[in-house]
């Protein structure tokens, strides 16, 4: 994917003395008192900011936080806690600037954080007038927020249209490289794990991947629907019976290409959905009418693990069972450890997937962990993200 990269501009000495506007993703979780409970996104934004400061730029950074009402400031919508944490990470004070669209006072070697961009009227609808005002603040616009790359908003798309120079920051560039390596030019076999509660939310992803992958592993409620499609009984498990036809179509599309959707041969069931429910391993053909399938069985997990260990590329979105309950976590743990042990290039994304990676401590063994939830899913669907599209256009001049 041909986009201009901020790292190249810095290396070429084209950033010194310039005003740089960085759109970061600093949308971090907070408790009721406004304390940040998890700062991964802030830490992920530091390399780009440091790169700009080291290159001698006057640096402005902004992000959304939560879902504020445009034009109505409330204290809980403020980036003040983020400014404090960013300052700690950078080892310098980071002033927070409100009402910044009309102008920002920042000099080379300085960095300021611009208040929650979603407070600006017209942000979400990508108002051209707002986007032009933002673009006028800077010489170089840097998009470094993959988590927002699927949204065409004033601070993510419009500003990139009108800024003198628009480029990808190191975080966004890394996402582009990882996605290209996994999906555009994958080392075969290419295995994809797509799990979740509903086929309907990931049907387009399943269809898109079925045209490209060598193995499509389904898990969670999605696997239950595919088990129905394969003629198996699933008791009272979560499934979408109305989408059995769509599941069959995916299975057939894969089969026509000599590829596979592995159907579980054994499962872990319970009579109730609870952490302390008794877990029973049984053959997939022996599920009873009052059973809930809450995980894949050990035989299925071993078979899938062996296949993943010999894969060339692995794309992972979603745990294959109710991994939050230890009795139903073994399938996800087996898959996670197989990915960690595989020599394949692996890319993982989605909130539950990241939670599973953290639970099993395999962060260093996954080749690339995507920072975007919705954006990652849209890439898997085969969509061109607005951020990628506008940056490619600008790279072409």
Image (cartoon, rainbow, N blue to C red):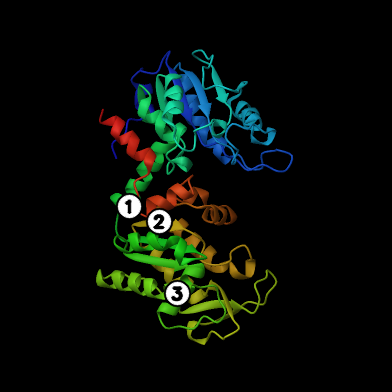
User: Residue at position x 45%, y 16% from top?
Assistant: 56
Separation of disc 2 and disc 3 at Cα? 27 Å
Q: Determine if residue 309 is in view.
A: no
Q: Residue at x 49, y 20 (%)?
A: 59
* Helix, strand or loop under label 2: strand
Mark 2 Cα shell of 10 Å, populated few (<14), some (14-19), many (≥20): many
The residue indicated by pointer 2 is 315
- Can residue 6 be seen from the camera position used here? yes
Residue situated in front as seen by the camera: 280 or 395 = 395
The residue to which callout 3 is attached is 242
Residue drawn where x is 62% and y is 28% of the image:
83
The quarter in which the N terminus is drawn is top left
Looking at the image, which is closer to me, 338 or 255? 255
Q: Is 236 positioned to the left or the right of 371 in the image? A: right
Name which residue lies at 49% across and 83% down.
233
Give the image location of residue 118, x and y in percent. 55, 34
| Left or right, residue 73 beside residue 150 | right
Please provide percent x and percent y for residue 195. 48, 63
Looking at the image, tell me whether mark 1 or mark 3 is earlier in sequence order.
1
- Say above or below: 354 vs 68: below
Secondary structure at numbered mark 1: helix
Residue depth check, mark 2 versus mark 3: number of the one nearer the observer:
3
The Cα–Cα distance between marks 1 and 3, rounded to whole angstroms, is: 30 Å
Q: Nearer the viewer, mark 1 or mark 3?
A: 3
Secondary structure under the numbered disc 3 in the rendered image: helix
Residue 309, by quadrant, is bottom left
Q: Earlier in the sequence, mark 2 or mark 3?
A: 3
Location of mark 1 (residue): 183
């Amino acid at each position: 994917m041909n986009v201009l990269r901020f790292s190249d501009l810095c290396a070429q000495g084209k950033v010194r003395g310039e005003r740089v506007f960085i759109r970061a993703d600093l949308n971090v979780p907070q408790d009721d008192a406004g304390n940040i409970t998890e700062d991964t996104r802030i830490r992920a934004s530091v390399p780009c900011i440091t790169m700009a400061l080291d290159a001698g730029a006057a640096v402005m950074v902004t992000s959304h936080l939560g879902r504020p009402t445009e034009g109505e400031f409330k204290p809980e919508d403020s980036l003040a806690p983020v400014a404090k944490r960013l300052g700690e990470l950078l080892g310098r004070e980071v002033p927070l600037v409100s009402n910044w669209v009309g102008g920002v006072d920042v000099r080379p070697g300085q960095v300021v954080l611009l208040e929650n961009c979603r407070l600006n009227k017209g942000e979400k609808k990508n108002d051209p007038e707002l986007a032009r005002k933002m673009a006028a603040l800077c010489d170089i616009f840097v998009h470094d927020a993959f988590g927002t790359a699927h949204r065409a908003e004033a601070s993510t798309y419009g500003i990139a249209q009108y800024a003198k120079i628009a480029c990808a920051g190191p975080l966004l560039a890394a996402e582009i490289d990882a996605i290209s390596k996994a999906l555009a030019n994958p080392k075969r076999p290419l295995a994809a794990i797509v799990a979740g509660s509903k086929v309907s939310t990931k049907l387009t992803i399943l269809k898109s991947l079925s045209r490209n992958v060598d193995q499509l592993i389904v898990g969670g409620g999605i696997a239950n629907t595919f088990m129905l499609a394969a003629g198996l009984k699933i008791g009272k498990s979560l499934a979408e019976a109305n989408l059995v036809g769509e599941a069959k179509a995916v299975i057939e599309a894969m089969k026509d290409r000599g590829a596979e959707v592995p159907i579980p041969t054994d499962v872990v069931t319970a009579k109730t959905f609870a952490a302390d429910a008794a877990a029973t391993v049984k053959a997939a053909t022996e599920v009873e009418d009052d059973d809930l399938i809450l995980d894949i069985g050990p035989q299925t997990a071993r078979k899938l693990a062996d296949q993943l260990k010999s894969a060339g590329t692995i794309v992972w979105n979603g745990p294959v069972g109710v991994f939050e309950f230890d009795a139903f976590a073994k399938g996800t743990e087996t898959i996670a450890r197989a990915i960690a042990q595989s020599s394949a290039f692996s890319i993982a994304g989605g909130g539950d997937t990241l939670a599973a990676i953290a639970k099993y401590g395999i962060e260093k063994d996954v080749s690339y962990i995507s920072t975007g939830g919705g954006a990652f899913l849209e890439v898997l669907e085969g969509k061109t993200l607005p951020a990628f599209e506008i940056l490619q256009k600008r790279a072409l001049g």
